[in-house]
Amino acid sequence: MNCTTQKFLKAGLSLILVSTPLWSHAEAETVGSVKTVTGESWVITTGQRVKAQVGTAVFLGSQLKTSKGATLGVTFKDNTLMSFGSDTELTVDEYLFAPTQGKLKLGARLDKGSLNYVSGVIAKLKPDAVSVKTPTGTIGVRGTQFLARVDEPSTATN
C-alpha cells in the first residue's frame, strides 16, 4: 500500500481500484474514417462493434465489415481510398503516416469480399510500404488503383 492509499483508509474513505483497458478508442489515433455507407456495415475495434455511419472513426486494428448488399467507403489520413462491396471483411493491420519522419506503412488483410483501392500519399511516396494480404497471397501496391476479390472457399467435395 502506498501513502495515498493509507491516508484514504485512515480517513475511513474507500478506495476503489478500477482496471481500464490499456488501449481505448479515446486514446487511439484514428487512421481514417467512413465516408460512404449503404446497407448495414460495421467497424469492429477491440471487440466493440459499431454500426458504420459517415464519420465513424477507423483505428489501427479495426475490422471493416459489410453485410450482403451493403457497400462501404473509407478514406485514410493519407487520402488512400478503399471501397468495399457486399459481404466483405478487411482488417487494418498496419498504418503509419508520418511523412516528415519517413514513417510510412499501410498493411491490410482482405479475408473475403471485394475491394477497390485507390492509392494515397503513402503509396506515392513509398510504394513498397503498402500491401494487402489475402488468404492465398499478398498484393504489393505499385500503381495507383486495383480491384481485388476474395471468394470464400468452396465446401463442395468431389
Image (spheres, rainbow, N blue to C red):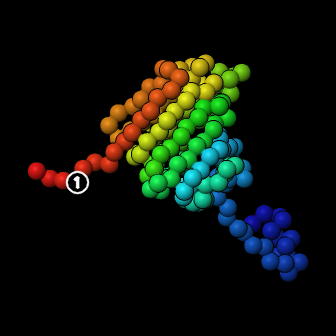
Position in image of residue 88 (x %, y %): 45, 48
Q: Quadrant of the N terminus?
A: bottom right
Residue at disc 1, secondary structure: loop
156 lies left or right of 37: left
* 41 w.r.t. 121: above or below: below
Q: Residue furthest left?
A: 158
Pinpoint residue 35: horizontal percent, then vertical percent: 65, 44
Residue 28, relative to residue 142: is it above or below? below
User: At label 1, which amino acid type do we have?
Assistant: Thr
Residue 104 in sight in this render:
no
In the depicted structure, whether residue 99 falls above or below residue 35:
above
**What residue would you read off at disc 1?**
155
Q: Residue at x 89, y 78 (%)?
A: 11
Report x, y in % for residue 97.
65, 30
Report the residue that reaches farthest toward the right.
Answer: 11
Number of numbered labels in the structure image: 1
Depth order, front residue of 30/143: 143
